[in-house]
Image (cartoon, rainbow, N blue to C red):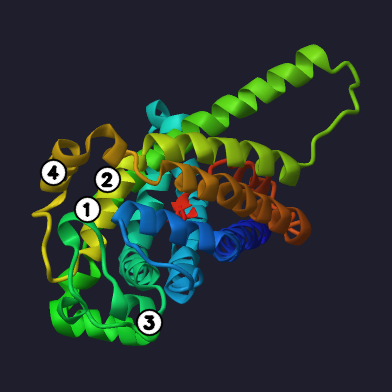
Amino acid sequence: MAIQSSTSSDTTQKHFFVMREFLWGAIAGAFGEGMMHPVDTVKTRIQSQAMLTASFYRGIAPGVTGSLATGATYFGVIESTKKWIEESHPSLGGHWAHFIAGAVGDTLGSFVYVPCEVMKQRMQVQGTLTSWSSVMMKDNISMKPSLQMYGYYTGMFQAGCSILKEQGLKGLYAGYWSTLARDVPFAGLMVVFYEGLKDLTEYGKQNYIRNPNFRINSSVEGLILGGLAGGFSAYLTTPLDVVKTRLQIQGSTLRYNGWLDAIRSIWMVEGAHGMFRGSIPRITWYIPASALTFMAVEFLRDHFNEGLSNPNSQDVASVSVEKKGSPLQGAV
């Protein structure tokens, strides 16, 4: 009877830890998005070729909402499934376990993240009411003020209702598959870079630092390594992000018929420069956003998980993967 009680207590405690990972991920994702939203606005406007100014916090409400969902599902799912994957499918352990768990977390979070991303990016592109009414965009998407792609959005709720009314669910989930096509490779690359950097750091500590008492704070390590991994991954997945952005902001005035057509058209008209348009602000966004998100998660774990006595929690707390859009979403 005592054994059953102990087992039940351990299981409940483990589930409580995993639930807290959802909370820590949500807080960290929203924190990273809120801090870096103006840079994300610059990136969106460069990629979409929008000729607008000011209002760099336009779209922050849907941005933070989407990052809450992405951060929660990513960190929560990866913590709850990583160990199961390693135990039930040993051949998928290590990097593959992280990759699969992260992909599942991204997919679940995308149901909330993508509509929020559509609203956020359209609000970012619009700028102020004056700028949206007086000038539109350049090149082959230039329009007169009377022929705007969609009306000016006054807020997140009004934007969602307007898109749903005019375009239905298809409008809210514009660029859904291109979002997944961007985020899954991003999550995989994040794992490879982050784990590689951790291995390199450990090698350096063992071979070049003779002091046995030397320790690096986990939050500081997450800040530095998470930022570097985020920057590398962000640059390599920029073409996928450009396609996603173009599909999500085009509204009812269709410019591309799907992501394959978008890739072909961008490459034919704009070349490699077009495919990597906005890479600098994207990297500028992801380095600090990834660093802040991962640092926040490690900080929350260190300060609020201390009372957990379940020995399994040590294994769970050691996970070293961060997303996007991410959040990190998508934030990452």
> Label 4, label 2: how many angstroms apart (C-alpha)?
18 Å
The local secondary structure at tag 2 comes to helix
Q: Position of residue 153 (x, y in %)?
A: 33, 83
Q: Is residue 150 above or below residue 192?
A: below
Identify residue type, mark 3: Thr
Q: Nearer the viewer, residue 319 or 147?
A: 147
Which-is-in-front pick, marks 1 and 4? 4
The residue identified by callout 2 is: 181
Q: Quadrant of the N terminus?
A: bottom right
Query: In terms of sequence position, does the residue under pointer 4 or pointer 2 come before the other?
Result: 2
Within-10-Å neighbours for mark 2: few <14, some 14–19, many 20+? some
Q: Are marks 1 and 2 in contact (CB under 8 Å)?
A: yes
The answer to whether residue 60 of the structure is visible from this angle is yes
The local secondary structure at tag 4 comes to helix
Which-is-in-front pick, marks 4 and 2? 4
Query: In terms of sequence position, does the residue under pointer 1 or pointer 3 come before the other?
Result: 3
Identify residue type, mark 2: Ala
The residue identified by callout 3 is: 130
Q: Is residue 264 above or below residue 212?
A: below
> Label 2, label 3: how many angstroms apart (C-alpha)?
35 Å
> Label 4, label 3: how many angstroms apart (C-alpha)?
31 Å
- The residue under the point 33% across, 72% down is 119
- Which corner quadrant of the image does residue 138 belong to? bottom left
Identify residue type, mark 4: Ser
Q: Nearer the viewer, residue 121 or 294?
A: 121
Which-is-in-front pick, marks 1 and 3? 3
- Numbered circle sitting on residue 265: 4
Within-10-Å neighbours for mark 4: few <14, some 14–19, many 20+? some
The residue identified by callout 1 is: 177
